[in-house]
Amino acid sequence: MPKNLVAHLQTVDAERRSATKGQRPIVIWLTGLSGAGKSSIANVLELALCNAGRHTYLLDGDNIRLGLCNDLGFSDADRVENIRRISEVAKLFMDAGLIVITAFISPFLRDRALAREVIGEGNFVEVFIDTPLSECERRDPKGLYKKAREGLIKNFTGIDSAYEAPLNPQVRINTLEDDLETAAQRIVDFIGKQSQK
């Protein structure tokens, strides 16, 4: 942490921003292999929440890497830094009173644990988009698995870089059984129950 920095106290706080929007801000963290369906589910989820009058923001892996994280590659160290930055951004958006949806491979248990710590235990909903590697390779929407198998992409999650599946996700989506709308509704139902506690 840099020296000589002091947090500036703001008059309008997170509680007031949340009250203004009439919602409880949270971070819904979608994790899974490339091609699992994270971005597709996140899009349907955000639309469902917006249609219900919720205030949202979607942080998607590729979009973030085109801007905020365009200086990062795909080494383990760069993946860690990518998730650290996303965690901090998601926390800021949550502080603004938004329901934040993130769609990132986020392959390592320790990094998702760090995200949960940064965001806060009660504000972090881990959603595992549980799609088998064989199905992700069959879909291969961006042609990345084919390139990885041919050795054209190094450090590709699921091929030559590890993916550590969540041990106890709050929501598990099986995309071989649930279509996009069903998957999104399961998440909506879960966060609805959480907000009543």
Image (cartoon, helix red, strand yellow):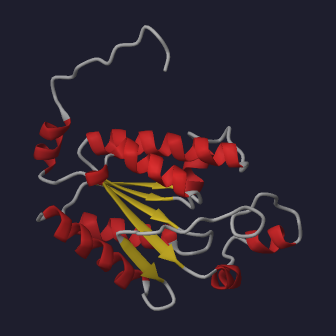
Please tell me which residue lies in front, 17 or 52: 17
Counting from the top left corner in percent of width and height, residue 153 is at 82, 61
* Rendered residue at 68%/38% (across/down): 71
Q: The C terminus is located in which quarter?
A: bottom left
Q: Is residue 189 visible?
A: yes
Q: Please tell me in which quadrant of the rendered image residue 52 appears.
A: bottom left
The residue at the far top in this view is 4
Q: Which residue extends farthest bottom? A: 177
Residue under the image location 25 percent in, 72 percent down: 190
x, y percent for residue 78 = 67, 43
Q: Is residue 55 left or right of residue 65?
A: left
Q: Is the residue 170 above or below the residue 6 in the image?
A: below
**Residue 34: x, y in percent?**
62, 69
Residue displayed at 49% across by 84% down: 175
Tally of numbered tags = 0
Nearer-the-camera pick, 110 or 154 = 110
Q: In this view, does 114 lie to the left or right of 162?
A: left
Q: Is residue 135 above or below residue 10?
A: below
Say above or below: 159 vs 109: below
Residue in the image at 53% along x and 50% along y: 111
In this rendering, is residue 28 above or below 10?
below
Quarter-of-image position of residue 67: top right
Visible residue check, residue 52:
no
Q: Where is residue 151 in the image (x, y as percent from the top left)?
A: 88, 65
Could you tell whether 121 is left or right of 138 in the image? Answer: left
